[in-house]
Amino acid sequence: MEKDSKIYIAGHRGLVGSAIMNHLIERGFSNLITRTSAELDLRASVAVAAFFEQEQPEYVFLAAAKVGGIVANNTYRADFIHDNLMIQNHVIHQSYVHGVKKLLFLGSTCIYPKECPQPMKEEYLLTGPLEYTNGPYAIAKIAGIKMCESYNLQYETNFVSVMPTNLYGPNDNFDLEKSHVLPALLRKVHLGRALEQGDWSAIQRDLDRLPIEGVTGQSSQEDQLKVFDKHGILLSDHGVQVAIWGSGAPMREFLWSQDMADACVFVMQHVDFKDLAGTTDEVRNTHLNIGTGHDISIKDLAGLIKKQVGFQGEFFFRDDKPDGTMKKLTDVSKLYGLGWEHRVNLENGVERMYKWYLQQK
């Protein structure tokens, strides 16, 4: 990519897309194309075709997706498989039709089997059953990988797939029902700290910015406490307790979103499909893992967040809620061998994320 190359970032407002866009701007790329979902519904084939015809992008970062945590994935199963298939099918196909020089498709490490050997190598894809709770989303992302591979093989395109581990950072989703574990825990612990300090102004600001089930900062304290209780933020005579779904035992790997963006730009600039395809007759597993190669238990993650936020209360574990896959650690040797490594460790990343959260209005 040149600094004035025409670059389309699909999903530029989300956690992934915004990190990529900001990274490109910082690196001096000036010809960026974006559309909000209201301006361009990527599920609509005619609209996507018209957009590509009009804009003629040279490079595409496909970061647009319907995403969510374990509850959202398991509840809205049809939406997750339908919307993600539609988005990626239309963008990948129109990138071929309009001669895009290179496309980067972003998936997720949930593509790997539930009982996958650890750490998870790219070659382990499709070697066992998926985790049930996020199966539809994972199947859509696997289809995206195979679509990129297939267009490359049939049409000699240059579409590369990357699979980031669990991401966190600015513009994350803090919805207590639909978000991933780290932002959900961070917000719950933040609200728990405000409760134990009797800081209702902080609670009001938080709920005005991000209402919970229609409860805002203008709602009564009784309604606020009811919705907190429902989502596992409990105030009693003995102090404040915050619920953690599951046993706390699952191990998870977390990557700072701006490190992920740096990796994506590195791959776009330095890694082509031919570098990943190998020389065998059967081309498989050409995607790249993006991660840190280090993981932490959910229980220890909660302790790290507690320390950062200054929460004095206690955690309790909801064993009636699903744990999901017990361990998901990526093998990042393939990408690291190509010359990229992460920079931000988890403790520093959580500190940055909480500072960012507090600055939001």
Image (cartoon, rainbow, N blue to C red):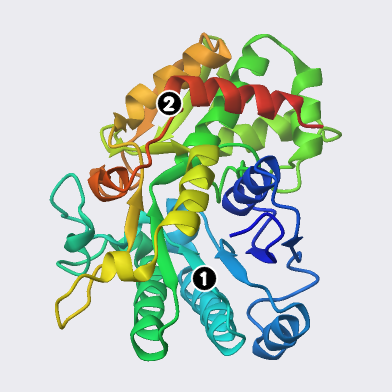
Give how far across and how far down residue 71 sits, in percent. Answer: 46, 53
- Camera-side residue of 307 and 156: 156
Give how far across and how far down residue 46 sits, in percent. Answer: 70, 91
Q: In which quarter of the image is residue 94?
A: bottom right
Give how far across and how far down residue 241 sits, in percent. Answer: 49, 20
Query: What is the quadrant of the C terminus in the image?
Result: top right
Can you say whether 245 is above or below 127 in the image? above
Can you say whether 103 is above or below 99 in the image? above
What is the secondary structure assignment of the residue under circle 2? helix
The residue carrying mark 2 is 346
Q: Residue 202 shows which numbered tag?
A: none
Residue 155 seen anywhere in this rendered image of the structure: yes
Residue 216 seen anywhere in this rendered image of the structure: no
Q: Are marks 1 and 2 in contact (CB under 8 Å)?
A: no
Q: Which tag, 1 or 2, sits closer to the chain's start?
A: 1
Q: Quadrant of residue 284?
A: bottom left
Q: State the residue at coordinates (45%, 30%).
A: 243
Query: Does 194 sit left or right of 336 as displayed?
Result: right
Query: What is the quadrant of the N terminus in the image?
Result: bottom right
Can you say whether 355 is above or below 35 in the image? above
Give how far across and how far down residue 358 sits, in percent. Answer: 71, 24
The residue carrying mark 1 is 102
Can you say whether 346 is above or below 307 in the image? below
- Camera-side residue of 271 and 254: 271
Query: Does 138 sit left or right of 124 as displayed?
Result: right
Q: State the residue at coordinates (68%, 83%).
A: 48
